[in-house]
Image: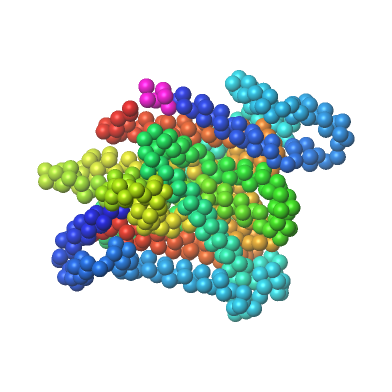
């Protein structure tokens, strides 16, 4: 019931978001056909605008767009005239999503053991050293760590290609460029929550029973200590997906991030609104999944 | 933060520290000086945190340098003073850039913009976050539920996308409007204005949550009831009695908001959406340097110095923020 309510709540939310994006784009000065190579006569311009229904009132245009969306039709791109927005997104989305999910795997796969290690070694020099490195990861923006990794692994060592997205070897550098920042964040979060958990009473009881360190950490503590990481997973995925366009820009990866900046500058109305709605839907669904997994891990959580 | 909580934590810290006599005596002098406010005790704890204190000194120096730079530097920020791509030397500590400008001057000039965006943006986040959180926490009930649900929703949305769409679409509009209202000089600063408002507007969520939580626990305390029974209005109660207890933790999170906004700004400027030339920020300087990357000749200083300054500053701000948090809320200390 709780989940059903959450799902129903998404509908008005998406309506508001899409309308806001729609209205914002139309409020901006300049239209999608202003930067054509040959200056069009007013008649031609009017004809083009009529073809794409840009001469209609805003609400009517929005209703028309919404009608298309319900049928899964994003409408035609106003800049890439021969393509539908849906086609362009379908081309780029798998790339962006795989980049985001791989970086997510790096963040969790590195960050969680890293945080546990620091919590176990708390107060020792290795805790401080790795703690410093994790903080460093959080402070180096992707556009700095990307070129650095390229310099080391692609230019000097020549182990990996410099850019593009063709083979598994191409995937490594972008994934780490995007993932290391979040690995540092997860590690810091994990250290904090693991430390608190290890000080709680039920762990003392487990120790008193004579359980081994690994049993205490992996069987008893991890289940509770991972919860803050899980609840950070939603915002993290948001940042991963939206942060990916910087990495896409650095490595010339053909994802959807490239479209966002360009089409918003070009006033490609349908493209921008389509992308905004797509991002919103993706993130809302992901957050929904996070909420569900939260309840599965921690039985104390009750959904009203 | 309530006073009792600090007190009890202080005591537990002292008990744990008994095997270290020096620390224990220091702590007990803290406890038995009744004149010390929570703020003063926090300051004492903070001073013992070496990385945090060093960061504070570093950041103050940087700020001073940025403010005094016009009088120190022999070069103007836009002056072309020689050949392009000169490596670091005694005259040009950071080398020169693609137009033959002194890179050190550019970096300090960029620091001015980056810090300004970080601080003003955090200020915007502060105003929105504190107002939102305080109202939600103080009024409570259904309004509280609705307001915090709104924050939850915003948390799960791609806020930076909105900032990008906002900046790209409304930039021209605002520029024209400002040019008419305030003259062309202010119109040139439009991107800056957008960064202030846009980044501040997406960074207030954590602040609102924290303030709301604090206000929620404070609003039923005896001193609030006392002041209400004396006939104080809601605004007065919030402003004079509740919020002064919240400022400590707010300042802590403010110092952690500044670096995250600087990071956002550098991303946008790197993509060419934020600061426009001839102005500079750390992000746009790194972007300029990255534009000169080629396999034949590496002008490493073009990236290394702006990026290094950015990273060290962010690091110092995080150390400072963590140190302040530990000082105000010492539950994690052993």
The stretch in magenta equals A1-6
Position of B287 compared to A168: left or right? right
Q: Quadrant of the C terminus of chain B?
A: bottom left
Pick whichever, A1 or B267, lies toward us.
Answer: A1
Question: Is A4 in front, or is A100?
Answer: A4
Q: Residue furthest front?
A: B231
User: In front: A295, or B95?
Assistant: A295
Check if residue B296 falls in the magenta segment. no
* Residue drawn where x is 86% and y is 40% of the image: A39
Q: B140 left or right of A100?
A: left
Number of numbered discs overlaid on the protein picture: 0
Q: Is residue B146 above or below residue B259?
A: above
Q: Quadrant of residue A236?
A: top left
At x 56%, y 37%, the residue is A95
Q: Position of residue A287 (x, y in %)?
A: 43, 34
Residue farthest along the left direction in this orientation: A209
Residue at screen point 71% across, 74% down:
B82
Residue B48 is left or right of residue B174, and the answer is: left
Q: Where is residue B114, by image quadrant?
A: bottom right
Q: Position of residue B309 (x, y in %)?
A: 52, 65
- x, y percentage for residue B169? 67, 43
Q: Is residue A205 above or below residue A89?
A: below
- Residue A286 appears in the picture as rendered: yes
Residue A104, compared with residue A48, is above or below; it is below
Magenta part mainly helix, strand or loop? helix
């Amino acid at each position: 019931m709780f989940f059903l309510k959450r799902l129903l709540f998404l509908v008005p939310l998406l309506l508001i978001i899409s309308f806001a994006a729609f209205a914002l784009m139309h409020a901006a000065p300049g239209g999608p056909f202003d930067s054509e190579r040959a200056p069009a006569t007013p008649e031609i311009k009017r004809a083009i605008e009529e073809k794409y229904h840009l001469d209609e009132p805003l609400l009517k245009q929005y209703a028309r767009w919404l009608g298309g969306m319900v049928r899964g039709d994003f409408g035609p791109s106003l800049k890439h005239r021969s393509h539908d927005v849906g086609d362009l997104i379908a081309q780029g989305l798998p790339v962006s999503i795989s980049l985001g999910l791989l970086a997510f795997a790096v963040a969790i796969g590195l960050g969680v053991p890293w945080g546990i290690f620091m919590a176990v070694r708390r107060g020792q020099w290795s805790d401080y050293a790795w703690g410093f490195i994790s903080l460093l990861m959080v402070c180096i923006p992707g556009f700095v760590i990307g070129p650095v990794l390229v310099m080391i692994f692609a230019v000097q060592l020549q182990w990996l290609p410099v850019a593009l997205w063709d083979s598994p070897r191409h995937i490594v550098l972008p994934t780490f460029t995007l993932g290391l920042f979040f690995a540092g964040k997860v590690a810091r979060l994990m250290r904090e929550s693991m430390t608190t958990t290890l000080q709680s009473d039920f762990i003392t009881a487990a120790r008193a029973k004579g359980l081994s360190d690994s049993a205490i950490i992996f069987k008893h503590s991890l289940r509770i200590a991972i919860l803050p990481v899980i609840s950070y997973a939603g915002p993290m995925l948001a940042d991963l997906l939206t942060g990916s366009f910087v990495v896409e820009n650095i490595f010339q990866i053909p994802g959807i991030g490239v479209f966002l900046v360009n089409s918003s500058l070009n006033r490609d109305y349908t493209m921008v609104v389509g992308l905004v709605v797509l991002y919103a839907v993706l993130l809302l669904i992901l957050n929904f999944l996070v909420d569900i997994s939260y309840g599965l891990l921690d039985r104390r959580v009750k959904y009203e | 933060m309530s006073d009792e909580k600090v007190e009890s934590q202080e005591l537990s810290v002292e008990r744990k520290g008994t095997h270290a006599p020096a620390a224990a005596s220091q702590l007990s002098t803290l406890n038995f000086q009744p004149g010390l406010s929570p703020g003063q005790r926090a300051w004492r704890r903070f001073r013992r945190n070496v990385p945090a204190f060093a960061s504070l000194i570093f950041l103050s120096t940087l700020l001073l340098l940025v403010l005094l730079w016009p009088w120190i530097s022999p070069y103007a920020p836009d002056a072309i003073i020689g050949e392009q791509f000169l490596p670091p030397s005694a005259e040009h500590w950071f080398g020169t850039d693609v137009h033959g400008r002194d890179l050190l001057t550019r970096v300090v000039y960029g620091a001015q913009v980056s810090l300004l965006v970080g601080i003003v943006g955090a200020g915007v986040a502060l105003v929105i976050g504190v107002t939102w959180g305080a109202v939600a926490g103080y009024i409570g009930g259904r309004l509280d539920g609705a307001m915090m649900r709104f924050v939850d929703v915003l948390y799960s949305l791609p806020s930076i996308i909105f900032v990008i769409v906002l900046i790209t679409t409304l930039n021209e509009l605002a520029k024209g409007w400002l040019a008419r209202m305030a003259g062309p000089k202010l119109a040139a600063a439009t991107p800056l204005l957008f960064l202030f408002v846009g980044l501040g507007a997406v960074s207030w969520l954590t602040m609102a949550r924290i303030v709301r939580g604090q206000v929620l626990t404070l609003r039923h305390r005896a001193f609030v009831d006392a002041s209400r029974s004396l006939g104080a209005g809601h605004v007065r109660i919030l402003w004079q009695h509740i919020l002064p207890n919240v400022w400590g933790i707010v300042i802590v999170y403010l110092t952690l908001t500044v670096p995250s906004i600087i990071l956002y700004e550098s991303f946008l400027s790197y993509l060419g959406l934020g600061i426009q030339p001839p102005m500079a920020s750390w992000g746009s300087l790194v972007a300029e340097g990255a534009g000169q990357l080629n396999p034949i000749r590496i002008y490493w200083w073009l990236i290394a110095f702006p990026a290094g300054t950015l990273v060290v500053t962010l690091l110092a701000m995080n150390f400072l923020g963590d140190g302040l948090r530990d000082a105000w809320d010492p539950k994690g200390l052993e």
